[in-house]
Image (cartoon, coloured by chain):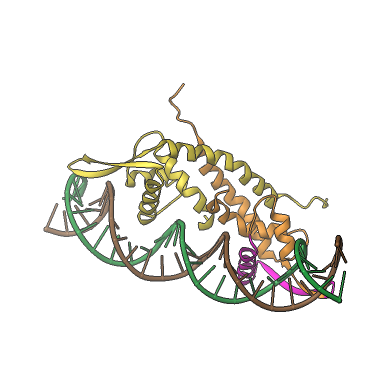
Chain colours: A yellow, B orange, C green, D brown
Amino acid sequence: MDIQLKRGLLDVCVLAAIKNEDSYGYKIIKDMKPYIELSESTLYTILKRLEQQEMLTVKSAEHDGRLRKYYHITGTGLKRIRDFREEWKEIMAIYQFVTKEDEHHE
Amino acid sequence: MDIQLKRGLLDVCVLAAIKNEDSYGYKIIKDMKPYIELSESTLYTILKRLEQQEMLTVKSAEHDGRLRKYYHITGTGLKRIRDFREEWKEIMAIYQFVTKEDEHHE
DNA sequence: ATGGAATACATCGTATCACGAAGTATATAC
DNA sequence: GTATATACTTCGTGATACGATGTATTCCAT
């Protein structure tokens, strides 16, 4: 898929991946894989950004003797997803504009 | 609207704006305005890129005594729009993933 | 006729951002 | 004991949208 098209979806997609239960880097990548593939460097950059924006919180926890960073979505993060639903209406309007056929052809 | 979300739509939206008839910078901006607002510097950057990618051709023509650059979509450009329709299926899958409700809540 | 919009295009610098490359470290399977 | 999977980190780079700024012409109101 076009890289540019992904850009606007990435952040919100990561948030969606931790929406129902806290998750960690590797698992997020796997869960997103069927929809969007992204590299580790990309994901951790995004996670750091989302943390700065207070869309999620981070907590280190031990698992099988080593530390994992678990990411938990915040109220702001949930709002981001709700806002995305609203933005989608504009996106659909753009989609219609791009794909509408020339009216006057038979 | 989120700038990031626009990114993937901009190129194809500009192509859509010249799909039915050749157009020029100022008019493209006006036609796109209801869907996506973009500055002149952004548009001309995009037009130059699309020309390099042979999605469109440029032809200067006189209008009211001064030169205008008219942009004409190519076969490659039209194919780009068709491909976009295909990509859209993936985008919709991502949208579903992001907005689907937690299954186990009543 | 004079000034200010509106039209029309161009260039430059900057900030954001996705990503590949490379690195560190541990657990598990063979 | 060696490879693979797990798990996270840092660095540098290229793409790109955009504000700022500049140039030049036409149109319109005063």
The magenta stretch is B39-65
User: Residue D27: percent from the left, percent from the top?
Assistant: 85, 66
Write the residue at 63% across / 51% down. Answer: B85
Depth order, front residue of A33/C17: C17
Verify whether residue B59 appears in magenta: yes
Judge left or right: residue A80 versus residue B35.
left
Write the residue at 61% across / 63% down. Answer: B42
Judge left or right: residue A65 versus residue B73.
left
In the image, residue B96 sits, relative to residue C13, either above or below, namely above
User: Residue C9: percent from the left, percent from the top?
Assistant: 70, 72
User: In this figure, what is the number of numbered marks?
Assistant: 0
Question: Residue A23 sits in which quadrant?
Answer: top left
User: Residue C22: percent from the left, percent from the top?
Assistant: 28, 66
User: Residue A16: percent from the left, percent from the top?
Assistant: 44, 40
Judge left or right: residue D15 versus residue C10.
left
Question: Residue A86 sits in which quadrant?
Answer: top right
In the image, residue B5 sits, relative to residue D17, either above or below, namely above
Write the residue at 60% across / 54% down. Answer: B9
Q: Is residue B22 visible?
A: no
Q: Is residue B27 visible?
A: yes
Judge left or right: residue B69 versus residue A87.
right
